[in-house]
Amino acid sequence: MTTDTATQSWLARLPKAELHLHIEGTLEPAMMFELAARNGVKLPYADVEAVRAAYKFDDLQSFLDLYYQGMNVLRTRADFHDLALAYFRRAHADGVAHIDVMFDPQGHLKRGITLQTLMDGLLQAMMDAQAEFGLSTSLILSFLRDLPAEDAMAVLEQAAPWYDRVAAVGLDSAERGNPPGKFAAVFARAKAIGLARTAHAGEEGPPAYIDEALDTLDVCRIDHGVRCIEDAALVARLRAAQIPLTVCPLSNVALRVVDKLVDHQLPAMLDAGLNVTLNSDDPAYFGGGMLANFRACADAFGWNRDTFRKLSANAVKAAFMPEDRRKKLLNEIRKHD
Ligand code: HPA
Ligand code: ZN
C-alpha cells in the first residue's frame, strides 16, 4: 500500500519526538568525505556511491564495524557541532520537535578525542538548534556493552563536569553475549548521581535481556525491545508497567532483525497494548530519518491518523524534556488534523 499525499504531508507536519537516535549514526556519506578532507583522514572508499554500496548489513555487528570506522573522521569540536546541527536541521524539516540524543563517548575517547571536545561540539549544536529553529534536545550518554564495565564506570566518572547537561545514561553496541546485568554497578552509580537510565535490549538479544535490564539496571525505557513479543509473560509485564519501547522499524529491516517491514512485530506490539514509539536509530545508515520511518510504517501497516497521534504522544510523554514543553507538544499533537 502506498500512502496518499495528503497523509504523507499530514505525517510531515505531525509534531514528533525522537527518543532513539545515535548522533554518530547521522553521519551521511557526503559529510564523511567533507570531514575526511578537512582532517586529512584517508577513507577506504572511492566516493559517496562506494560508501552507500558498503551499507549492506547481515546483522548488528556488520553494521557496528562500519559505524565505528565512520566515526574516525570526527576529530574536532567543529566536526561534532556540524554533524549534530546538520542532523537537527534535517529532523526539524521532518517535523521533529524534540530529540533525546544518544552519543558514544567511548567510540571517541579510544581514538584520543577528549570528552571536552565532544561535549563542547554537541552542546553548541544543541543551543544553536534551539535558538535557530526551536528544536529541543537532551543527551543520553551511552556505554559500549562489548567493553568492560570498568571502562563504562571510568567514563561516567570522567563526565562529572557535565552531569547537569546529561539527562540519562544508555547502553548500546553488540548485544549478544553482553547481558545488561554486566552494567548493574555502573547504572546504580548513574542513579545515585541523579541520571535517568535506558538500555538497548531485545534487538538481537533474547527477550530475557529485557527483563534483566528492568531488574538490574532500573531503566525507565527499553531501546528496541521488539523481541519481547516472543515471551507472553514479558509482554504482560511491559503492558502493565507501560514501559516505553523505542522501536526503530527501518533499522530492524536493515540489520535483518526482521526480513521485511510487513513482517515487523509492531502491529502485534500495538495490539498487545504496549507503549510503542517510532525512531530512526542511525538514519544515515538505515535508509532515512523520522519521517521516512513514519511513512514506511504507513505504507506497510496502513495505520490511521489516530494511531500515529498515539505513537507521537507516547514519545513526547516518555521524552526527557521540561514539563511545560511536554504539555505544549501533547496539545499540538491532539489538535493536529
Ligand atoms: N544497536 C546497538 N548499538 C548501536 C545501534 C543499535 O541499533 N546503533 C548504534 N549503536
Ligand atoms: Zn540504537
Image: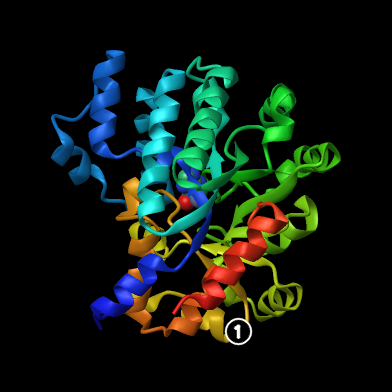
Question: Is residue 175 left or right of 156 when viewed as pictured?
Answer: left
Question: Is residue 168 left or right of 87 when viewed as pictured?
Answer: right
- x and y percent of residue 13 in the render? 39, 66
The residue that label 1 is drawn on is: 272
Task: Please state which amino acid type lies under the numbered disc 1.
Answer: Ala
- x and y percent of residue 171 in the render? 62, 45
Please determine whether, in this image, residue 336 is positioned above or below residue 208: below
Split into 4 quadrants, where in the image is the C terminus?
Answer: bottom left
Of residues 231 and 194, which is closer to you in this image?
194
Image quadrant assignment for residue 302: bottom left
User: Is residue 190 visible in the rendered structure shown here?
Assistant: yes
Most distant residue in the right direction: 192
- x and y percent of residue 292 in the render? 33, 62
What crowding class fits label 1: few (fewer than 14 Cα within 10 Å), some (14-19), or many (20 or more)? some
Image quadrant assignment for residue 228: bottom right
At a point 33% along the width and 53% down the height, the residue shown is: 286
At a point 26% along the width and 50% down the height, the residue shown is: 56
User: Is residue 266 visible in the rendered structure shown here?
Assistant: no
At a point 30% along the width and 73% down the height, the residue shown is: 8
Question: Is residue 36 left or right of 207 when viewed as pictured?
Answer: left
- x and y percent of residue 207 in the render? 62, 66
At a point 73% along the width and 32% down the height, the residue shown is: 163
